[in-house]
Amino acid sequence: MDREWTDEQNLLRRTLRDYVAKNVTPNVLDWEAAGEVPRSLFADLAELGVLGLRLSPEYGGGGQDFWFTAVLIDELMRCGSIGVPVAVMAHAEFATMLIDRYGGPGLRETYVRGAAEGRLIGSLGVSEPDAGSDVSALRTRAVRDGGDYVINGSKLYISNGTIADYITLAVRTGEPGAHGVSMIVVPADSPGLRRRRLKKLGTHASDTAELFFEDCRVPAANLLGAENQGFGMIMSGFEGERLVLSVMACSLARLMFEEARNWGQQRRAFGRKLLGFQVWQHRLADVLTRIEAAEALTLRGIDRYLAGRPAQSEISMAKLFATETARMAASECAQIFGGLGYMEECLMGRLHRDALAMTIGAGSSEIMRGLIARANDLVAS
Ligand SMILES: Cc1cc2nc3c(=O)[nH]c(=O)nc-3n(C[C@H](O)[C@H](O)[C@H](O)COP(=O)(O)OP(=O)(O)OC[C@H]3O[C@@H](n4cnc5c(N)ncnc54)[C@H](O)[C@@H]3O)c2cc1C
């Protein structure tokens, strides 16, 4: 993305580029086959000082702003497997930022420090079989019993679900609707928690799970903030999550564009390079134009978010446009590869199927359009 990066951010980029080229890219096919990234990835990133970039320094984090996270995502994406940045972001951003922001000192000492040091892996559990886009409909219930909460219910599509050591879990503690939701940290070895890995179409290096809670006991001290305040926490976390997805989508789209351009410069048909046909020059020009527009919207969303200004409209536009651009780029860029673009052996083929998930997670395109409509007076009174 085109902006004035600081010396520190450029240094981070160089460090990560070297690490990813030597230690991630050569292994991603094995990790995709295994359906998960190894724990050593988290330990290595912690060792490099880049795992908890936005977490509080007093608990081992980097205390940096979102631009550093953007560099991390962009460089991890270069490995060619979107499951890798998804696993790292689900841990460091989605699961742990909420604990850092709303947890008491004891929880932060255990989980934020453990996360930043790469000793503990986190996941965020919000979605359920009957409550995805509509978070306020979630039903997994936590009932206070002495010094514990007893949790019953289930969660679906949880990234890092089977490899996590803790789950930052959304539960119902009060009345139906948004006002009865709380957040609690559930250690993964809690009795009464079962986990099942799901098979997905893509993002194979990121493990995704269904979680079952049957009289699962968790200390009441693991509650984040006050009871029934969880919905606002989830919504505040969504801003960062949507920017993460926006950056990821821009990086993915650019990677696919570069693959397609390289292929168009070498593959020949009817005696010419494919980029000798104007149709391909124009199709890839359209892809690049959309990528640059998506990057501009994403930069604007990050700027407003970091300035502490209301940013729901800008962030929703960035997430909507960047993820739809990734899907469009996937389709266009795979097409120029012909049959090869449909093969697992081909990087473009794998990026193509990975791109499909981007318009669903952290609020679907339809939800983004609804938020943009509400923020811009487009809803009839
Ligand atoms: C790879 C992957 C990883 C994920 N990781 C996590 C995770 O770590 N933690 C977690 O909690 N969740 C996770 N999710 C779940 C994700 O957040 C949900 O899938 C998403 O919020 C959509 O919910 P749903 O699947 O239940 O779809 P639904 O909410 O049932 O929506 C189905 C369709 O209806 C549309 N729709 C819904 N409401 C409206 C409306 N008001 N107007 C118009 N259209 C509407 C949706 O856009 C969608 O197209 C993940 C999902 C995927 C695919």
Image (spheres, rainbow, N blue to C red):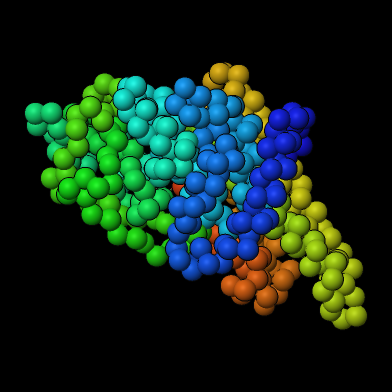
Where residue 78 sits: x, y (%)? 66, 53
Q: Nearer the viewer, residue 312 or 181?
A: 181
* Residue plotted at (51% across, 35% down): 52
Q: Nearer the viewer, residue 114 or 156?
A: 114
> Which residue reaches farthest front?
47
Where residue 46 sits: x, y (%)? 53, 41
* Residue plotted at (59% across, 27% down): 65
* Residue plotted at (69% across, 62% down): 332
Q: Quadrant of residue 257?
A: bottom right
From where the camera sits, is residue 35 visible? Answer: yes
Where residue 256 sits: x, y (%)? 69, 58
Where residue 144 sits: x, y (%)? 13, 30
Q: Quadrant of residue 104?
A: top left
> Which residue reaches farthest bottom?
270
Vertical placement of residue 373 versus 188, above or below? above
Residue 155 left/right relative to 25: left
Residue 15 left/right relative to 183: right
Residue 284 left/right relative to 109: right
